[in-house]
Image: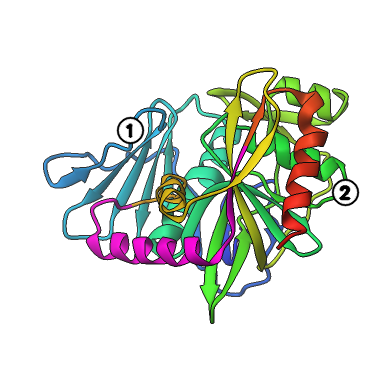
Amino acid sequence: MNNYIFCDISIESDIVLPGLSASTAITPDIIFRVNYSGHPPVIDGSWQKAALGEGNIVSPAVLTGTDIHCLFFENIAVFEIRNGFSEIICHPESVSSLNSIHHLLLDQVLPRLLSARGKLMMHGSCIEHPKGMIVFAGVSGAGKSTLAAHFSRRGFPLLSDDGLQLKQEAGKITVIPTYPGLRLWGDSIAELFDGAALSEPMADYSSKMRIVSESVVHMDERHALALFFLHPQSPGTQPSIARKVKREAFFELNKQVFILDSFSRERSIARTKFTARLVSSLPMYDLSFPHDYSMLDQVQMNVLDMVETL
């Protein structure tokens, strides 16, 4: 078996999970298995199904009165979550690649599972600044990975490009990266790495590539410095940064949070209270810029100038 660290938990897996650091934990927090021969649960009237909205590739369901959940990725795999959110069984389609299973587990399933275990898991990238972690959030395609990669190429360590945990203890807000990794579209690889980066397909259903040659390292939790919500703009627009109004930041932050069980009132209340505390404590900004690689140095300068005031 293979043992890994994801965020701040340990995982035992029967397949290799590239990009994760090795764990020395004797007893894993989560056990992951791939079941090629079995069949996923039949979803009938005893299950509650949630609609996450347009743009989501996952359909979640929970067996009423239990802690058994299923995450359905059409024509790819079904992930069954059991035993108090400590066991994941993947039922892949026969044509699904290990790259797809690996990607969905790390970037969709595990963040949702950890959210059900009481952690605030957020869809975003983060880089390390001498004063703390800088987080970039936004919808898919907003430029989170590209901007984080640009910072990384300029000497700021890339800690995660798709997910992270926000944590608050004794009034201190920290970030725990899920795992170090970098996934980019072909044009970003060509611009940021001169097309020379070693890469492999991220998943069967996407043309994004996973960078395997970039120097990244797993990091423990670090002080959260600031959070930037990315907003793509039309070509020719100048980059701009504006402090986010708390009420708007609250709703924007909740859009970027991973959720497994949307039917759980208790978890929903706890998550809402936590995000309300976050927007009152963590500086949050709107960062607008066009999809123009020549503007990235200016965007970086604007971000660095802003965090120097904190």
Most common secondary structure along the magenta stretch:
helix
Measured Cα–Cα span from mark 1 to mark 2: 38 Å
| Span shown in magenta | 261-287
Q: Earlier in the sequence, mark 1 or mark 2?
A: 1
Q: Nearer the viewer, residue 310 or 107?
A: 310
Q: Measuring 69% from the left and 33% from the top, which residue is drawn there?
A: 239
Q: Amino acid at mark 1?
A: Gly
Q: Is mark 1 in CB contact (under 8 Å) with mark 2? A: no
What residue appears at the point 82 percent right and 29 percent down from the top-left corner? Answer: 192
Q: Which residue is mark 1?
A: 53
Q: In the drawing, what numbered circle is on residue 266? A: none
Picture coordinates of residue 101 (x, y %)?
A: 53, 38
In the displayed structure image, the side of residue 206 where residue 93 appears, left or right = left
Question: Of the residues shown, which amino acid type is indicated by label 2?
Answer: Gly
Q: In x, y percent, where is residue 23? A: 67, 66
Read off the residue under disc 2.
155
**Which residue is painted at 53% across and 78% down in the image?**
169
Q: Quadrant of residue 131?
A: bottom right
Note whether residue 93 is visible.
yes
Q: Residue furthest top?
A: 235
- Residue ID at (33%, 33%): 53
Q: Quadrant of residue 238?
A: top right
